[in-house]
Amino acid sequence: MAETLHGILASLQEADRLEDLQRLTRHMRDRLRVRHCVYHWLRAEGEEYRCGTYSKHWRRRYDRRCYRRIDPVVIDGFRRFDPVDWKELDWSGKAARAYRRDALDHGVGSQGFSIPLRGPNGQFALFSVTDTTSDAAWAEFTAARQPDLILVGHYLNRKALELAGPTLPAPSRSLSPREIEALTYLAQGYGRGRVADVLSISEHTLRAYIESARFKLGAANTTHAVARAAMEGLIVVGAAPAGPGTRGAAAAPPR
């Protein structure tokens, strides 16, 4: 797994044109052994960019039918920061069910997993992988690969923003709520195991959030990331972050 992740990230770092990202999504698909890899951004003013392995026919059909307005993956992605398995989404509406059938008919895949991403000035993006495997096999894949997919998604989003040049502002140093929580607890002296327990995530997933935050902050290591986040006012040292882990943090001091 580590070799696969290293190869993907190295390829992203070497990309020097937006057109390279289309080729790299095919590379990611093959390395991850999934049916499709797709990256898609939307900006507040309506500008879009996408690359991925969906067929041209499906991409044109998606646009022509304005599916993004009813696509549960896009709708839910706007509301959350954590990754989402498509099986967890609400497909009960008539429009959503019709869209789902059409997507299946056009080879999108019965399984999907998306990483919501944010950028400057309202930029929103999704990095998604899809497949046609069984529920059990997909659950095993996403459990093992989620941290890798989070990192790949953030690197891909950063690279796309960088290569877009003057048409987009430079990426900001915004952190996701989970990244803020992780760095805040680390700043308070919590060990990684304790932080993972408080946030109800695995240490493997916690490491992915820390590495993502470190990358965004341009930090050399975790300590540097915590210091830079505190210096820039992204975290407040000594204050428990608001969120799911707050009660646990108050009830059980760091060990």
Image (cartoon, rainbow, N blue to C red):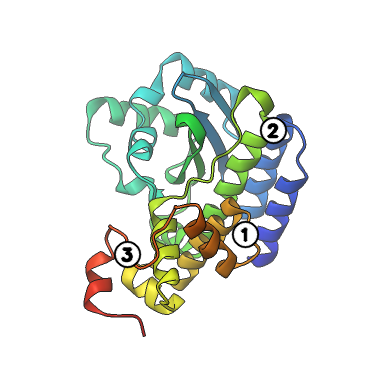
State the image coordinates of residue 62 (x, y, percent, origin top left): 46, 22
Q: Earlier in the sequence, mark 2 or mark 3?
A: 2
- Give the distance between the C-alpha atoms of the residues marked 1 and 2, in whole angstroms: 21 Å
Q: Residues within 10 Å of mark 3 (few under 14, many from 20)?
A: few
**Residue placed under numbered mark 2 in the picture:** 163
Q: Are marks 1 and 3 in contact (CB under 8 Å)?
A: no
Q: Amino acid at mark 3?
A: Ala
What residue sits 39% from the left and 69% below the top?
185
**Residue placed under numbered mark 1 in the picture:** 219
- Residue lying at the far front in this picture: please name it: 231
In the picture, the quarter occupied by the C terminus is bottom left
Q: Earlier in the sequence, mark 1 or mark 2?
A: 2
Q: Earlier in the sequence, mark 1 or mark 3?
A: 1
Q: Are marks 2 and 3 in contact (CB under 8 Å)?
A: no
Residue 61 appears in the figure: yes
Q: Residues within 10 Å of mark 2 (few under 14, many from 20)?
A: some
What residue sits 38% from the left and 49% below the top?
84
**Residue placed under numbered mark 3 in the picture:** 239
Circle 1: element type:
loop
State the image coordinates of residue 13 (x, y, percent, origin top left): 73, 47
Q: Nearer the viewer, mark 1 or mark 3?
A: 3
* Up-down relation of residue 114 to residue 217 (above or below): above
Q: Amino acid at mark 2?
A: Leu
Given residues 180 and 93, the one toward you in this image is 180
Q: Nearer the viewer, mark 2 or mark 3?
A: 3
What residue sits 48% from the left and 45% below the top?
174
Q: Nearer the viewer, mark 1 or mark 2?
A: 1
Circle 3: element type:
loop
